[in-house]
């Protein structure tokens, strides 16, 4: 018998907490409610959760601050922001801080449950994923979700790691934003794609995937992205618009 998924919820509004908790419970998951960030910190030791649903606007320490602190000690716990903050700048900031997903209130039951399930799929070990070889100076341990660069471990969020693995497994090929949304983000093609650009930008800067580096992560206008080896050893897929 499979274990019931334990979902933590940090929400200071008791009415919202009851509504969200009911949505989670009706989907066959257990919801552990924390009314404040202090309550969350106090109970996180004895209580083990599989995923955290987090409000931004909390009394005292904000949800954003709590997420940043959490990521320093726990890089793998899936975290979904569920907040009334609907500005693009807030969404980008939340994702850059390490959130795996971002939902604007009011929550819709089916969407919330689907996004929780999607986040859990992404967090699962990629034991069946294709091994990545001949990727110097990078080294991949897919089962343990670890990346090294010239022998030094690089800390990535789960989504950053999944995105990088997906691109390396398709090196030389143009990968559309729609494909990334479907296969890495696991959402439909109608979702805004700006978060993909944000993650790509972060990978370029952190891993040096630009300029004269060994690997380049190229943006292909109106199509998506292509990861190529700078020395040309791997053939790069050419689009008609690039053929000259």
Image: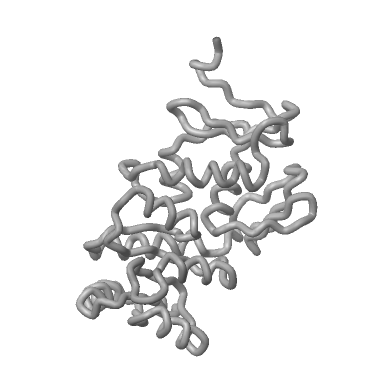
- In the foreground, 73 or 186: 73
In the rendered image, residue 219, in percent from the top left (x then y), is placed at 53, 31
Residue 174: x %, y % from top left: 53, 31
> From this viewpoint, which residue is outermost toward the front?
60
In the foreground, 204 or 222: 204
Image coordinates for residue 38, horizontal then vertical, percent: 42, 83
Q: Residue at x 31, y 51 (%)?
A: 87
Position above or below: 231 against 205? above
| Residue shown at the point (70%, 33%) measured from the top left | 229
The image quadrant that residue 242 belongs to is top right
Pick the residue in front: 164 or 133.
Answer: 164
By what rule are the colours in the image chosen? one colour
Left or right of 107 on screen, residue 160: right
Q: Is residue 63 left or right of residue 162?
A: left
Residue drawn 34% across the image and 68% down it: 55
List x then y, in percent, for residue 107: 24, 63
Left or right: 147 in relation to 197: right
User: Dividing the image into 4 quarters, which one contains the C terminus?
Assistant: top right
Res. 201 image quadrant:
top right
Q: Which image quarter holds the N terminus?
A: bottom left
């Amino acid at each position: 018998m499979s274990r019931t998924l334990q979902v933590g919820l940090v929400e200071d509004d008791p009415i919202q907490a009851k509504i969200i908790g009911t949505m989670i419970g009706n989907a066959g998951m257990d919801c552990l409610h924390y009314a404040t960030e202090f309550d969350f910190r106090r109970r996180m030791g004895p209580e083990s959760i599989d995923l955290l649903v987090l409000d931004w606007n909390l009394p005292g320490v904000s949800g954003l601050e709590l997420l940043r602190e959490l990521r320093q000690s726990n890089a793998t716990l899936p975290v979904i922001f569920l907040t009334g903050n609907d500005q693009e700048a807030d969404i980008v900031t939340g994702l850059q801080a390490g959130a795996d997903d971002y939902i604007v209130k009011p929550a819709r039951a089916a969407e919330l449950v689907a996004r929780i399930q999607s986040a859990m799929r992404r967090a699962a070990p990629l034991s069946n994923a294709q091994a990545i070889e001949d990727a110097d100076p990078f080294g991949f341990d897919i089962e343990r979700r670890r990346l090294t660069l010239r022998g030094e471990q690089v800390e990535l969020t789960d989504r950053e790691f999944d995105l990088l693995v997906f691109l390396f497994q398709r090196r030389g090929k143009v990968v559309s934003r729609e494909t990334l949304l479907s296969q890495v983000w696991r959402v439909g093609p109608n979702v805004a794609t700006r978060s993909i650009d944000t993650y790509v930008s972060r990978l370029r800067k952190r891993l040096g995937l630009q300029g004269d580096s060994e690997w380049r992560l190229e943006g292909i206008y109106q199509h998506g992205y292509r990861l190529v080896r700078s020395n040309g050893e791997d053939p790069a897929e050419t689009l008609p618009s690039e053929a000259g």
